[in-house]
Structures are given as structure tokens and as C-alpha cells.
Image (cartoon, rainbow, N blue to C red):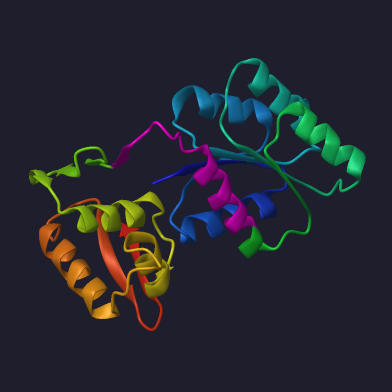
Amino acid sequence: MFTVLVVEDDTQLNNLFCKTLSRNGYKTLSAADPKKGLEFLDSDKVDLIITDIMMPEMNGFEFVRLLREGEVNIPVMVISAKGDIVDKQSGFFAGADDYMVKPVDLQEMLLRVQALLRRAKSVSDRKLILGNTKLEYDTWTVTDNQGSQILPQKEFKLIYKLLSYPGQIFTRQQILDDIWGPEEYVDSHTLDVHISRLRERFKDNKDFEIVTIRGLGYRVLTK
């Protein structure tokens, strides 16, 4: 599960952002100012930061600049009422990865968060950890509370894709195109069979479950 740190002094907005993220499969940490945000960074693993600009003691630009000077390379999204091009330039020059202007569309925010996390994944990092479940891409191995098992290639790629984005709904066509390729004809029954096999393999897994979204596709929910 990805962890998002929300640094926002407006309590209502902070709560709204955190609730929206939580409902979509993210763990959230809430900070009313950059100082508290820095404390979280010292004690918690954070995958992405959402920060306001106008805050007491230290503004968002200074916060981002401080992170980058300290070689903290966590993706940062700025969400601010300051929408002038000069403000946006200041945000990007400070080291922000994305910039949204209030009021924000929450669905767009989620899409941008997802894109930032996807880009932040290191190409060389071919392991995925979710709770006590570890996936090793190079060997198609999954290790969890039941032990280790090597999966067939397509099954491994399928579970790796779903677990990479907990909470996200993937349509059947998205999965078929990504796992089998758009040039290879595979009907949806083949996907259903693979999902059934994965459910049987991981029926006792304590970290996740594969959920069918009727009429759409599948997603993984964390337990």
C-alpha cells in the first residue's frame, strides 16, 4: 500500500484529501504544517507528498526546496490557490513534480497521484512488497504467510499488475492488452480462469484479496 503525506493547514481540505485517498487504497498521513510533515518523514515510509503553499512558519515552496536540498526524492504534488504562471514556475523550480490549482477535481487528483507514483517506480526495482507479501519479478516468485511459490508467467504478471496499484480498477480489456498484448487474441474467459487460479493460490493470504467489479473488471483490496 502506498503512503501519501498530506501537508495542508486547512483542516477541511486536509480531511477531504485524506478521505479521498484512503477510499482509493492509499494510506494517508495528515500534517497541518511542514514541520509536522518533516517529523512524519523521519519516522514513516512516505511514497508521495501533497502540499499546500500558504502555510504558517514555512511555506510550501520552502518545504519542497528543503526536501530537495536534503536529497529527499519523494514525488511532490503542490495543490494551491496560487495559480499564476509565476507561482507554478516557483513550485517547479523548488523541485515539485506536479502542480494543481484549487479548487481541485478529486478524480483528477487521484489520476495525477497514480501517474506520479508510477513514474517514481525505479526501472531497476523489480520487487514489490505489500505487507508480508513479496513479489520478485525476475524469478516470478511470490512469498507470503503461506511460503514461497513460483507462478506461471501470465499469472505472475497479472497479480503483479494488480498489486502494484491497490484499489485501482482495471478493466478486462486493459488487463488483456497489458498481459497478453493487443496483438494476441485472448477471450475474457482466459482472464477469468487466471483470476480463479490466483484466488485459489492466495485464498489464505492475509494482505490482499482480488475483487470482481461487475461489468468492469478487477481490483485488489488490502486487508
Say which residue appears at 22% left-offset and 68% top-offset. 195
Which percent across, then down, holds residue 26? Answer: 46, 51
Say which residue appears at 24% left-offset and 51% top-offset. 207
Q: Nearer the viewer, residue 218 or 167?
A: 218
Residue 122 image-quadrant placement: top left
Q: Nearer the viewer, residue 200 or 156?
A: 156
Say which residue appears at 10% left-offset and 46% top-offset. 149
202 vs 94, left or right, is left
Q: Does residue 188 sit above or below 51 in this rendering?
A: below
Q: Does residue 190 sit above or below 62 in this rendering?
A: below
77 vs 173, left or right, is right
Q: Nearer the viewer, residue 39 or 217?
A: 217
Q: Does residue 46 sit above or below 67 in this rendering?
A: below
Tell how many labels. 0
Query: Which residue, as the protein is rendered here, is positioned at the far front?
Result: 183
Q: Is residue 59 visible?
A: no
Query: Which residue, as the protein is rendered here, is positioned at the far top?
Result: 70
Say which quadrant the C terminus sits in: bottom left
Residues shaded magenta: 109-130
Q: Is residue 84 visible?
A: yes
Which percent across, then down, holds residue 196? Answer: 17, 70
